[in-house]
Amino acid sequence: MTEKDYIIVGRDVGEAKFHLVGNNVLPAQDNPGGTPLDVVYMGKLIGEMSERVGEDRKASEEEIKLMRLCMRADSLPPGQLDEMTENTLIENTAMEVIFETRTSGSCIHEDKNIRIVAIPSDGTLKTGLEQLEMPAVGKPFQPPLTYPVDENLMLSWMLDGIIEKVTSVESPEDLDSMNWHQIRKHFADTIEAGLIAQADEDKVSQIEAFHRAVGIYMTSMCR
């Protein structure tokens, strides 16, 4: 019987436990260089495997072993698994690699495609929903199934838009009597109100956003 709720996920950038150096797997803590075994490595490997054809369209035992080293066990809520437990869970996790196929017909209307939809083990999505911290009415929420790296990349990408919102804030009528703290608050309140209003227009609740993210991961892979 499972004592704690957990999920098996890929190790994000900066979370690799091992590096691939030549044909050797070395501990990341020793800074061995080479290639970190994380989601970046998995994505590159999946991209390479997707181009294989015929009898080569399969994953080797070594590739499956390396992909498993890219995974980690994460408790819900986080921080409840010791290192030994996490290691044991990963060692007991089987990686099954299935290739999708496309069979071309004499014309596009006769093409046959197979899309693989992987359904998570029981309780994982339910537990994820239960862990969502519901914000107060009118307050924004963190988009589900995103990570710190996603946030940093998006903020960098949206920099021009952020600057535009800052420079478009109208000057308050009593600007001459305001101190720097009040000016900063004026900017923050104005921008926050505008962003919340835009989010409200999308009419996506936090639970709907969670289901949307799950659906996107399942159906829009690598687009």
Image: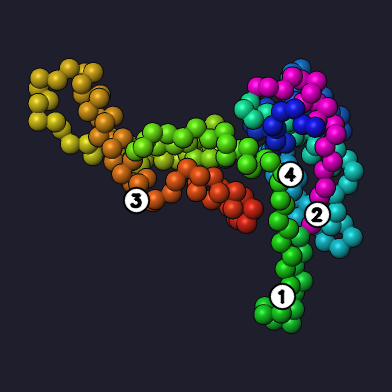
Residue on which disc 3 sits: 201
Q: Amino acid at mark 1?
A: Asp
* Res. 98 mark: 2
- Please name the amino acid that badge 4 sits on: Ser
Q: Earlier in the sequence, mark 2 or mark 1?
A: 2
Horizontally, residue 18 falls left or right of residue 170, namely: right
Q: State the mark number for residue 176.
A: none
Disc 1 target residue: 111
Kindly check if marks 2 and 1 are in contact, taking CB atoms under 8 A apart as contact: no
Q: Is residue 55 left or right of residue 216?
A: right
The segment highlighted magenta reads: 79-99
Residue 66 lies, in percent from the top left, at 82, 37
The percent position of residue 24, horizontal first and vertical second, equals: 86, 29
Dot in front, 3 or 4: 4
Q: Is residue 216 above or below residue 186?
A: below
| Residue 121: mark | 4
Instruction: Please identify the quarter of the rendering in which residue 85 is found.
Output: top right
